[in-house]
Amino acid sequence: MSAITFCTLCENKGVSGIFRCEGCSQTFCLQHTNEHRQYLTHQLKEIMLENEAIFKCFTDNKQSSLLFDQINQWEKDSIVKVQQTAQNARLQIQQFSQVQKEQTKEKFSQINKQLEEARQTQKYLEKDLYRWKILLEQLQYDLCMLSPSIILHQDHSQGLINNIFILKKDQQSILNEKLISSSTEIYFDDNHHVAMHCGPCRAPAHVIGTQEYSSGQHQIRLFISKSTDEFILSFNIMSKLMPMSTISSDSQYLTYGWQSNDCVNPFHCSLASDKHFQDLRGKTKFHIKLFMDCDQQKISYFNEKTKQTREINVDIQKCPLPWKLLLYLYDIGDSVRLLSSCQLS
């Protein structure tokens, strides 16, 4: 005879169960069997209602709409921040521009005085005309570009949008480098930061920097202006051990750099890809960042207008440290201006 199983829910524990639910493994009497089934039916209806509500959210795309709202708000906030940053930078530039205009006005007044004096006395030669022409070109550069000591800096460490701000450095602190030359064709201005080929005729003229570079990484910014694109101009490095008298002749030492026709100095450092490379050729105005890496024994340049970069490995046996800046001018009216110089590391 089998054992009697009682109803799980009955208060009177003596009521026998007639139905055992396979889902919850409980036994119920007739009354509680019906109630248990009704409870399960109610639970099913609630799940179906929840399913309908979720499906409605899915079809209404409310989740995507919320994300779009967040993106739109981020966009608005970002635009406001960018506009405010840009406006602050404009105000700074306006202030610096006013100071620059006053300084340029003073230089212009000095040139104007020299021109008027030359007109009245008739004491001027071709070299004076070339010098005044180049100085006026430098003044025009200042009016268009502002001072070379004013830099628009982008903070690339930021996220999606780089922050910008204006940097203004003391001119003397960023121009330790100066230019000198033994060539009679070369004249200087702006405390030996501008070198000008003033003739009286076309002739090779070498200009060197006074600073020596023996270790670390260094950067020199140059504004190079050629009278025409017909003749070659070059920017290079040379060894301090190399005598100036041997630059244009055979020497145990070599100079390393680039010519305005895109050729490399020395020629044997040219790569196969350099044959068709074009960056400086045909141009008369260059904004160049020249990098000297004494530790890795290489030099490179960055053309600020074309964004092109080139690099040369330096044979330390042929160009021993310390290095010096070397510029080659040939045509009357060619000039080089030092914009800044600094040690990077």
Image (cartoon, rainbow, N blue to C red):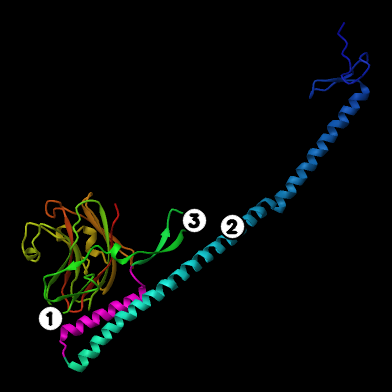
Task: Tell me if 57 is positioned left or right of 105 in this view.
Answer: right
Mark seen at residue 160: 3
Tell me the crowding category of disc 2: few under 14, some 14 to 19, or many 20 or more residues within 10 angstroms, Cα based.
Answer: few
Mark 3: amino acid: Leu
Mark 2: amino acid: Trp
Towards the viewer: 40 or 196: 196
**Furthest residue to the top?**
1
Which residue is found at the position 49% from the left and 56% from the top?
Answer: 160
Residue 311 visible from this viewpoint: no
Residue 22, position in %: x, y?
A: 80, 22
Which residue is found at the position 86% from the left and 31% from the top?
Answer: 39
For residue 201, above or below residue 252: below
Distance from the alpha carbon under mark 2 to that under mark 1: 63 Å
In this figure, which residue is indicated by the disc labeled 2? 74
Task: Tell me if 180 is positioned left or right of 246 in this view.
Answer: right
Mark seen at residue 201: 1
User: Please, what secondary structure does the residue beneath circle 2 have?
Assistant: helix
